[in-house]
Amino acid sequence: MITGPIRAPFSASEVTILDGGLATELERRGNDLSDPLWSARLLIEAPDEIVAAHQAYFRAGARVATTASYQASFDGFAARGIDRAAATALFIRSVELAAEGRRRHRAATAQGDGRLLVAASVGPYGAMLADGSEYHGDYGLSVAELAAWHKPRLAVLAASGADLLAIETIPSLDEGRALVELLTTSTGPPTWLSFTCADGTRTRHGEPVEAAFALAEATDRIVAVGINCTAPEHAEELVGRARSVTDKAIVVYPNSGERWDARTRRWTGQVGASVDPASARRWVAAGARAVGGCCRVGPDRITELAEASLG
């Protein structure tokens, strides 16, 4: 059983508000993220911008800050001439910056709320490729190869001092299996496992979502499972399918419903169903215990969720 402050975000008695898209807020603040490292570039060049973005989400009412490590990888840093020791320090810096955002928020608001948590983001293999492949998961790698790639980064973030690990935007059953294998053979903080889905029934790679969500049952390290970077109109059905295979907490943080065009490096399409209180109430009624937003969902939307009565 999880004890201490980690119980609150995933308790049966309250709904936890997650943050929104970190890159979304960084771009709104005028930062250029057109780089293979995406928001992780600012770990090197503008760390205080990351702190400010975390503060914005805490001010909006988020209880969890997700770090700027989603697109960070040893391979990606090496391509910039950053050696392994320096890359390790940047992973740890991502957690420290989120913690600093929390500290500044508490100082500004005179809040000593211990339920404000830092979740170290563990993005998919496709994020390192920076070609949009996290939206299909066709990597051509085995489970063992994926586990070997994820292992060193996961180990660093697990020992970074983060309150939680957020394994997110996982597009395929094989990548989920690789990460769960690592969790079952290592120690570290409580973890949520979140998949990106093509619709209300399939992962981006095409597997039944029930098989993906059921992976959470393999280890007590996983305290929650769910979806992110998925069109919000599919969220309610996906929560129900997750609830059908696990009693663990369900996390839901969709994107705006727009689509990422990796070739032109821009979002396309129209916003459909929204990340808004009405939608979030349906997700909670279906079984979600933590809600927030992903790409193109900013602090204004998180404020709406935080101020709503979600149960």
Image (cartoon, helix red, strand yellow):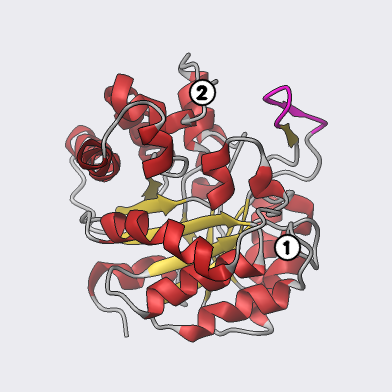
Crowding at mark 1 (Cα within 10 Å: few <14, some 14-19, many 20+):
many
| Residue ID for mark 1 | 203
Q: Is residue 267 above or below residue 218?
A: above
How far apart, in angstroms, are the residues tagged by discs 1 and 2? 27 Å
Q: Is residue 112 above or below residue 167?
A: above
- The percent coordinates of residue 8 (x first, y second) are 35, 69
Crowding at mark 2 (Cα within 10 Å: few <14, some 14-19, many 20+):
few
The residue lying at 65 percent from left, 79 percent from top is 243
Q: Is residue 290 above or below residue 91?
A: below
Instruction: Examine the residues drawn in magenta and state their main secondary structure.
Output: loop
Magenta residues (range): 262-270
Q: Amino acid at mark 2?
A: Asp
| Residue ID for mark 2 | 35
The reply, left or right, for residue 274 in relation to residue 57 is: right
The reply, left or right, for residue 299 in relation to residue 161 is: right
- The percent coordinates of residue 48 (x first, y second) are 27, 24
- The percent coordinates of residue 122 (x first, y second) are 44, 53
The residue lying at 27 percent from left, 74 percent from top is 187
Closer to the observer: label 1 or label 2?
2
- The percent coordinates of residue 152 (x first, y second) are 33, 57
Q: Nearer the viewer, residue 165 or 140?
A: 140
Q: Are marks 1 and 2 in contact (CB under 8 Å)?
A: no
